[in-house]
Structure formats: structure tokens, C-alpha cells
């Protein structure tokens, strides 16, 4: 009976020592894999775009305001009908049809700029066409 208790005691002691050693390895010794995992979990890069405030005169009249503009991009792999998309966009945005059509046919690329500094009205018109593979970025 006494031997069984001693065996159980030493078994539990070895398990606890194993856990303590494993904990020390994780906490104290450097580990690239864990450091990478930690960085992924706790650090994130977020780009914040600054917004300029409204500039007013002494009477409160607005002198300068920020106007939203948009940039149009395409994912050629997702554009279902490049010919129709190129025709509509080239006519509306005054872009060369052939070069635009060639860009939209290149299925190897996943991102191409089509036009920058678009107004809100232009964005709305293009969105209403419901052309797949097109997107906007606020600037």
C-alpha cells in the first residue's frame, strides 16, 4: 500500500515538474514561432486617413471644406464582360477604350487603377451600372 502511494506521489510530482518545465520553456526561452503568433494576435497596422476640418472666417462662414473624392479600381479576374465595361467606362470617364479593354482582359492581375479623383456623382452613376469586379476607394 505504501509503495502504491509513493508511486502515485512521484508520478504526480513528475507530471507537475513536466508542466513547470514546459511553462518555463514557453515563458522564458525565445521562440520565433510563438513570437510570430504573438505579433499576429496583438499587433495590427491600421492606416488612418486624416480629415481636414472646416475652415471658417470670424463670422462662421465656411471658407474651405474637404470634398470627398473616389478612386475607381478593377479586379480583371472578376469582371464578367470586359468589353461592355470598357465601352461604358471609356465613354463616361473619357478613357481610351483600347487600353482600358486590354487592361480588363489581363486576368493575371487582381488590381488595376482605372481613374482617380472621381466625384460622388460619378461614383453613383458607375455603381448603378452594377458591373462586377469594379470598386471604389475613398480618398
Image (tube, helix red, strand yellow):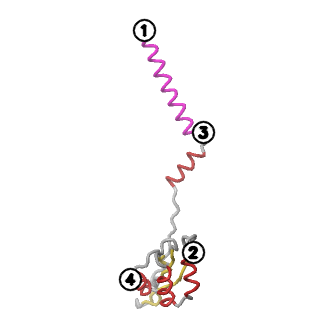
Closer to the observer: label 3 or label 2?
2
- Helix, strand or loop at disc 3? loop
The part of the image, by quadrant, that contains residue 9 is: top left
Q: Is residue 50 magenta?
A: no
Where does the magenta region start and end?
1-28
Q: Which residue is mark 1?
A: 2
Residue 29's label in the rendered image is 3
Q: Which residue is mark 2?
A: 106
Looking at the picture, does residue 83 appear above or below residue 94? Answer: above
Q: Nearer the viewer, residue 55 or 97?
A: 97
Q: Residues within 10 Å of mark 2 (few under 14, many from 20)?
A: some
Q: Nearer the viewer, residue 128 or 3?
A: 128
Cα gap from disc 2 to disc 1, whole angstroms: 80 Å
Closer to the observer: label 4 or label 2?
2
Identity of the residue drawn at 57% across and 74% down:
106
Along the horizontal axis of the image, is 109 left or right of 121? right
Closer to the observer: label 3 or label 4?
4
Cα gap from disc 3 to disc 2, whole angstroms: 49 Å
Q: Which residue is mark 4?
A: 128
Residue 126 place in picture, x, y as percent: 43, 83
Residue 112 place in picture, x, y as percent: 55, 76
Amino acid at each position: 500500500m505504501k509503495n502504491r502511494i509513493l508511486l502515485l506521489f512521484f508520478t504526480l510530482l513528475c507530471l507537475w515538474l513536466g508542466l513547470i518545465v514546459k511553462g518555463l520553456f514557453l515563458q522564458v526561452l525565445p521562440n520565433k514561432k510563438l513570437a510570430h503568433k504573438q505579433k499576429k494576435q496583438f499587433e495590427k497596422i491600421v492606416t488612418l486617413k486624416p480629415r481636414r476640418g472646416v475652415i471658417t472666417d470670424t463670422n462662421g462662414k465656411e471658407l474651405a471644406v474637404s470634398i470627398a473624392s473616389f478612386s475607381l479600381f478593377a479586379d480583371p479576374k472578376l469582371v464578367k464582360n470586359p468589353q461592355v465595361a470598357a465601352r461604358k467606362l471609356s465613354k463616361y470617364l473619357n478613357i481610351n477604350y483600347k487600353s482600358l479593354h486590354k487592361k480588363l482582359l489581363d486576368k493575371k492581375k487582381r488590381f488595376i487603377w482605372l481613374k482617380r479623383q472621381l466625384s460622388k456623382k460619378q461614383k453613383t452613376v458607375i455603381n448603378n451600372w452594377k458591373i462586377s469586379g469594379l470598386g471604389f476607394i475613398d480618398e
